[in-house]
Image (tube, rainbow, N blue to C red):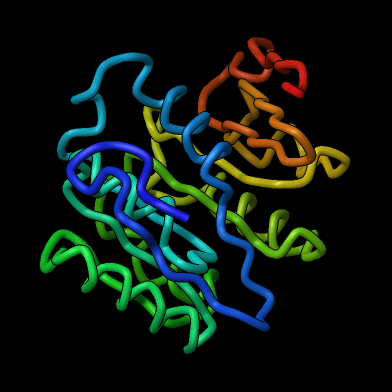
Amino acid sequence: MRVIAGKYRSRPLRSLRGMDIRPTADRLREALFNVLTAGAPDALAGSVWLDLFAGTGAVGIEALSRGAGQVSFVESSAPAARVVRQNLDSLGIKAGFVVVQAEVLKALKKIDAAGKVDFVFLDPPYEFAEGYRSTLEFLGSAQFVDATTVVIAEHVKRFDPGEKFGALARFRKLVRGDAALSFYRKGEGVQNAAAAEPATP
């Protein structure tokens, strides 16, 4: 596992052995950031991120590598939160982040009025369907999520996390192999623009 692009390009990232940690695969992470940057290397400069169910922190670290201004890593597992800190330390990242060891909903309730977030990435354990529903429902009414915030959920292709959660509606679905990314945004008519991309072999 490595950083795909940006300041820390090709630098290795640690994971955990023998635990239920599933880092976002390099290939899927590359596809995610290709969508978000759309060919503009500086598109994420100064952006504010939430990396929920952070695991190893690979997605949030990729965002920092590409110029994000602030990333909050939220992870309930103490060993996983420790790996996030180790990965940040190994890259020499000293600022622009916070690692929160807490259940996701508890952490979100504390930051609900803390200011706008540009991107929210969530990657619950694939079998934890309730984690998708409860987190997306909360984000659908959260004050820090507005019409320009993009919420991305990683999930297996065979599982559909849902189309709409309050004001939050899916506008794009990207499939790569057995994994998929669902993109959500607030606003009327967003669901009518939903589009699914075919799986890539």
- Give residue 108's position: percent from left, percent from top: 45, 66
Residue 138: where, in percent of width, then height? 57, 56
Residue 64, given in percent of the width and then of the height, sits at 24, 49
Residue visible at 34% across and 47% down? 62
Of the pair 197 and 30, the residue shown nearer to us: 30
Quarter holding the C terminus is top right
Q: Is residue 34 left or right of residue 65?
A: right
In the picture provided, is 97 more to the left or to the right than 92?
Answer: right
Residue 198's quadrant in the figure? Answer: top right
Report how many numbered discs are placed on residues in the image.
0
Task: Give the residue drawn at x 46%, y 67%.
Answer: 56
**Residue 129 in the image: above or below residue 173:** below
Q: Is residue 90 left or right of residue 35?
A: left
Question: Image height check: is 66 above or below 113?
Answer: above
**Which residue ends up furthest to the bottom in the rendered image?**
78
Using the rendered view, name the quadrant where residue 7 is placed: top left
Kindly give the residue lying farthest to the right in the view shown.
158
As drawn, 92 above or below 149: below
Q: Residue at x 25, y 51 (%)?
A: 115
Residue at 11 percent across and 68 percent down: it is 94
